[in-house]
Structures are given as C-alpha cells and as structure tokens.
Amino acid sequence: MPPAASLRPFQLDRSLSERLADEYGTPLYVVSEAHFRDRARQYTGAWTEGDVSYACKANSNLEILRWANGEGLSIDVASRGELEAALRAGVPGGRIRLHGNYKTEEDIRAAMQAGVAEVVADSLLEIAHLARLGWRGHLSLRLALDVHAGSSEKISTSHPDTKFGLSVATGDALAGVRSALDFGLNLIGYHCHVGSMMPVPGPVAEAARSMAEFAKRTQAATGFWPLALNLGGGLAVDYTPEDDPVSVSAFCASIAQAAKDALGKDWPELRIEPGRSIAAPAGLTLYRVGVVKRSSSGRKFVAVDGGMSDNPRPALYGARYTVQSFRSGASEATTVVGRHCESDVLFEDVDLASDVEPGDLLQVLHTGAYNASMSSNYNRFPRPAMVAIDDSGGSRVIERRESLDDLFRREGGEI
Ligand SMILES: Cc1ncc(COP(=O)(O)O)c(C=O)c1O
C-alpha cells in the first residue's frame, strides 16, 4: 500500500474518472480501499491506550465494514440495521458496541441474541430496561458533560441542551451508576461523544477531564471505578482548504494525555470511536454536469445529475466541499446545484473552471462519510452505486445503483 503522504486526498485523474463514469454511470460514489485502510491504520498506530472502534454511521457498506474489521477495529452501531450490517459483514458480536439515545426493546433483544459486547446506555429508563431484559454484556453510561464542540450545533452532542446521555449536572449520571450497580449490571465505565468536525482536540480533552472528575466523585460516592473510558469520535477532515484539522496522531496524543493527566495514576482502558476521519477521505462522488446557466443576479449555476438525495449535508447544515472539474483553464465562483425540488444548492460559490460544459464530469472530494449513509430517495431518485478502487486502480461494485423497481418494492405489499 502506498505511504500515507501520497494518499491524501483521494482523487481521480481524468482518464480513470471517465472510465468509471462510462462503466458505472453517475452520480457515483467511489471509495478507495487503500485510503480507508490507511486512515484506520493511522488510528491503530496512534492509539495505544485501548480499543479503536469504527463508528459505522459514517458509512456502513458491508465491504467497508469488512475493511474496518480486517484492520482490527471494533464496530459501533446505532440501530438494528447497523447491527445487522456489522453481523452480515462478519464482525463478531463480541466486537460490536450498541449506541443510541433510544434503543427499542427489539434493538436490545437483537443485541443480546448477537452476543454484542457492550451497550452504551443513554437514560435512566434504559438502564432499567436493560436490567429487566436480562442484559449480561458490558454496560457503559454515556455522559452529558456540558461541553460545546463541533462546527455546527447540529453535530455538537454534549452541550447543556443535548438529547444525548445522562447529565452529570442534573445528577442523572450518578443516579445511573447507582442504578446499574443496584441492578447488578456489568457496568464497565463511561462514554462521551462531544461532537463532530472538530479541527482541534480541545473539546475532547475538556470532556476527558470532566469525565475523570466525574469518575473520581462517583468513586467517592459509590466505590465504582471504571474499567474503560470511551472518548468518542469527532476529528474533522479537510473538506476545503480552509479546514485545517490536526493529524490523527496529534489528536490521539493530545486527548490520551489529557485523560491520563486528569485520571492520575490509575487510568483505565481508554477507547475512541472515529467515523468521519476514517471514511470521509476515502471517498469521492462523481457527477455529470447537465446544465450551465447564469441567473439575473449574475450567479453562475452548474446543475449536476445528483443532489441532496445523495449528499444531504449541505442542505442540513451548510457543509462545504472541494469540487473539481478536469479542465485546467481559469476558474470562477460557481454554484453547483442538484436536481431536487428544494433549492438543492449542493456547493455554493466554489471555484470551478469557467469553461465547464454540459457533459463534463465533476469530482467532489471527501464524500466517503455521511453521504451514502444519509442518502434518500427524495423525488424518487434511485441511490447511486458505490464502487471500490483497489491498489492497482481496478474497480468493482460494492453497492449497485438502485433501479426504478427498487423504488417501488415496499409498496402495495403486506406489513
Ligand atoms: C456516539 C458516537 N460515536 C462516534 C461518532 C463518530 O463521530 P465522527 O464521525 O465525527 O468521528 C458519532 C457520530 O455522530 C457518535 O454519535
């Protein structure tokens, strides 16, 4: 596999992109196995404190889960469907952790049947449910620590207004520990995930300190000392040149040190669970340009053959991306739009070659995370295919394009 430095960012040259577009059509998700594995290895190389888990909400394609599993990552799932994906990819239950702010009884029973290693409880009620259902695996408590993080409130998940976790401030977290111990559950520790798209380790380091304080206070009150502390995911990627996240190794070193300093000499196993920073740089999307025009205000629009159904992130929270054409001339500010009936602005005011024409291909970098996994059939658009590129530039379909028939498969049948 090529060295890490040569691997970033994953992008295609004109001839391979044309070959892929001709063979598989557009829009097309293209993922690089080498990039994915390289990012996974950056984590396993940098994190010597304990388990590294892949948060598969980023991209739970079965082949991608096999790569993660093959790199020795455990898998985080946040739904019955993600659990099923991990199992179908061959991940043993003992390497799976179940998350979610509201797990149904069905989720918990499925986890029990699969021998899932750990459930991360998110509420007092859930602890009681786990006890009632006879959960015997490991249990962690997700803590709400009142830490602000992330580039958008929509992906900041441990602030005072969050729906996630047991609040330390309200006393729910301590009550959760007491309750888990009273029920005789196999409580192993605490979890937090303060947010996503964090360019610096500061918020996670702050969360680690806050967890350590909670652990010490709770030990004084209950005698319980954790066997594992999970610091979540959250490292940003460089979607645009303005994003300048620290490296995986700097991120890992900083948060591990913050946790150890705060815990003192008896630190437990430390765990992390990145998603975006492993999967995003390994993927890109190819679109075909269909229309080029100018509005009365002078704005230049380029319409492509996909849109918010294959990448909802710009519409959801103004996410920005790097968009490239394969033309080399002068560039100008261009707004790339999709084909959907909202305004469906995909990439606003990006720098794009001024002579882009209908029929051209565009590649959008860093779409390996939270694109396919958040895609929809809005406007009855079939979802794109996903193609994996191997070391020698060979390609194979790892998720076929949806057909029109796929769109109607659920209608007119029985429940
Ligand atoms: C509990 C949990 N862990 C890990 C992650 C992964 O975060 P990221 O993709 O930012 O690394 C998420 C993302 O939402 C999460 O909710």
Image (tube, grey):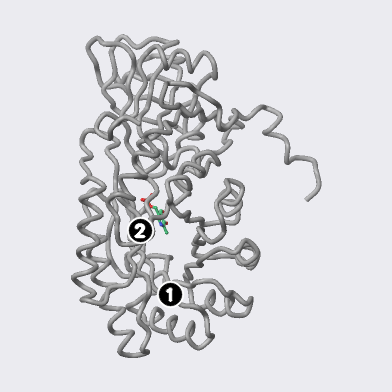
- Tell me, for residue 272, which label it has, or none: 2
Which residue appears at 58% of the width and 30% of the height? 381
Q: How many numbered marks does the figure carry?
A: 2
- Tell me, for residue 380, which label it has, or none: none
Task: Please name the amino acid that badge 2 sits on.
Answer: Ile
Front residue of 91 and 121: 91
Give coordinates of residue 67: x percent, y percent. 47, 41
Which residue appears at 39% of the width and 39% of the height? 37
Q: Residues within 10 Å of mark 1 (few under 14, many from 20)?
A: some
- Image region (quadrant) for ligand 1: bottom left
Which residue appears at 62% of the width and 67% of the height? 112
Give coordinates of residue 247: x percent, y percent. 23, 45
Give coordinates of residue 202: x percent, y percent. 20, 58
Tell me the SS state at disc 2: loop
Which residue in the protein does label 1 denote? 188
Give coordinates of residue 149: x percent, y percent. 28, 57
